[in-house]
Image: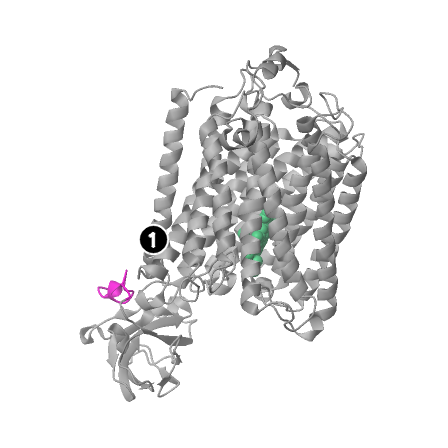
Amino acid sequence: METSLPTHSDNHAAHHGPAKGIKRWLFTTNHKDIGTLYLWFAFIMFLTGGAMAMVIRAELFQPGLQIVEPHFFNQMTTVHGLIMVFGAVMPAFTGLANWLIPLMIGAPDMALPRMNNLSFWILPFAFLILLMSLFMEGGGPAFGWTFYAPLSTTYSGDSTALFVFSVHIMGISSIMGAINVIVTIFNMRAPGMTWMKLPLFVWTWFITAYLLIAVMPVLAGAVTMVLTDKYFGTSFFSAAGGGDPVLFQHIFWFFGHPEVYIMILPAFGIISAIVPTFSRKKLFGYSSMVYATASIAFLSFIVWAHHMFTTGMPVAAELFFMYCTMLISVPTGVKVFNWVATMWRGSISFEVPMMFAIAFIILFTFGGFSGLMLAITPVDFQYHDTYFVVAHFHYVLVTGAIFSLIAATYYWLPKWTGVMYDNKLAKWHFWCSLISVNVLFFPMHFVGLAGMPRRIPDYSIQFADWNQIISLGGFAFGLSQLIFLALLIKACRKKGEPVPAKVWDGAEGLEWDLPSPTPYHTFSTPPKIK
Amino acid sequence: MTEPNTSNAVLVKKLVLAVVCMFGFGFALVPLYDVFCDLTGINGRQINRVDASQTQLIDKSRLVKVEFATFTGQLSGWRFEAVEPFVSVNPGQMKAVKFRLVNLNKDTANIQAIPSVSPGTAGLYLNKLECFCFEQQLINPSSETEFVMQFFIDTALPKNIKVMTLAYTLFEVENQAVVYPAQEQNNDRS
Ligand code: HEM
Ligand SMILES: [Cu+2]
């Protein structure tokens, strides 16, 4: 895709720079500012949730109860999960969408800039409420990020109302973000930017936005039912009043499984941008990537009960969900195949974004394999609710979603700031993260297969050695992210070599024709798409 | 920056409508789940309440073992047990079994027993004429009560089901609103 850039946009930016001071950030409707806000917010949440993971790993360093009480341990696992899912991964992808979608489709901004501001600024309040509930008498939510009834109804504390309220706000924020993405992609594409010319990041986000619109309201319904069951005497999930706690799990996972794809589809888009750049080849199988993404999104609605194999479903249902789940690995496999085929015989160079992308491809696929094991109904009876599941979803989420986010940051950060980040720090960050993340999560497979249950602050003595190693890996991974923090602060202070417009020589796409750093206003007149 | 044009507004309206519909869908799952479970009997909540006119010829060719499990759930100070832990019956054969409930507390309590059958589909073939689970039971303090449950297994019971378990869990009902009582829903099955 070659473009001729309207030179007009440079001097335009010089005329209307951003407002000064805090007001710039509070009232901004600029997609780049809002993208930056989302990304920093997500990073702060990542560190906050990470700190909770450190508490969890410190307690699990030895068998027995040492550091925290079981009830506090449960709050840590719960809030860690909620923060990482709704506070770190999802806002980070929304931040990237804000920054990149308008640049990639040649639009001057998001379609609904004021709603964009609102959808960001309600988020900090949601998490403030959630975090403050930890300090209430009786503590914060302790029922797991999945808030199964009756744990969240009959057995939960007074903070449940705050939990429900904050999940509602998070949901409203992501729904607004999703609406904005869809309207932008529909209506704001530069003339000539046809559907099958859209970069894959735009495509994957487009489909993700539909997933969000389909399932976030169902989550809102689920928390509302928990609220009324707990406080207003309804019995949606209480057998005493004619309800059924298993129904909760159906509703939750009807949201929950598409949700895990919400957290991975944009990652697929990122990897599909990075791998061709550093292989100096066109992406292999563009259209099959689009169709694979769409079929994953569709299939994600009919596999939810693979989280419920042990709830006593009839055999026919277990088989149905088992086969549908396995079916998802076909389009996922298509993607992995295409990335590898893109690298095949490419002239690959190993810049840091590419290193993270390759780590993603290998380790995410690994998480897919443990997913396939979990999808086999009879063996899931053994694996369910053990550390094996924890290993699975951390491979797909940490070395999957989070690694893709880090790769994206290294890939586009020079474009945003105009300076190359500290490459030495970046390499340290990569190697420390790569080694520690595997020390952290790989042995979880072993203790899981050996029967160590998840979400329990104590364990039997035979798991002690591995848990010590896991905890050490955990602390190392946590510390490694501080390298990233240092690097980001340095880059945002514009300390580094200035970069040209096309930061990576193999990069393609409209954003690389814009000057670096990206001007405050871009594409005020649409670019020409060839 | 572009002001939202009409086609933006139309699109936003459609998307908001989709959001509202999906919120509704979340709640619609509740009755849908019930209907689905009742039709297929898959979660064992299905209890058929029948009357004496619906009895069937006894199928002497096979015996079905019916086991009873009793749970006091979250209640403390209660003893709840089946007098016979299991019975073996021919399909179609009427059987009465006894359950004993002891309230060791010093308070009167309103008790609802919630039945559940496993395997789930067997619930479709368990016909009850009389059961303490049909109604809430007012139990006196420090008392012992015996309940009779009368049932027969439908002769249409699939041949591969040779054992079924009927479990009761006790709940104390204070002012819990009954949203959709599972028992009454199936009264009209005949
Ligand atoms: C080939 C693809 C995949 C398959 C076959 C698969 C299968 C499964 C199965 C069967 C479970 C339930 C295990 C149990 O609780 O016993 C599970 C759990 C989970 N999966 Fe996957 N999965 C796949 C990919 C993914 C991806 C891409 C993500 C997220 C990015 C993901 C995130 C999760 C999470 C978060 C859980 C645990 C939820 C919880 O109980 O807290 N999975 N997966
Ligand atoms: Cu799933």
Q: Is residue B177 magenta?
A: yes
Q: Quadrant of residue A345?
A: top right
Closer to us: B43 or A136: A136
Quadrant location, the C terminus of chain B: bottom left
Q: Which residue is mark 1?
A: B32
Q: Picture coordinates of residue A171 (x, y %)?
A: 45, 44
Closer to us: B130 or A183: A183
Residue at 38% x, 35% y: name it. B16
Q: Is residue A235 magenta?
A: no
The part of the chain drawn in magenta is B176-190
Which colouring convention does the figure follow? one colour
Residue at 53% x, 67% y: name it. A71
Residue at 52% x, 59% y: name it. A144
The amino acid type of the residue labelled 1 equals Leu
Left or right position of A424 against B95: right
Q: Main secondary structure of the magenta part?
A: loop
> Alpha-carbon neighbours of circle 1 within 10 Å: few (<14), some, or many (≥20)?
few
- Would residue A98 be visible to someone looking at this image? no
Q: Picture coordinates of residue A278 (x, y %)?
A: 75, 31
Left or right position of A57 against A94: right
Vertical order, A498 against A147 (above or below): above
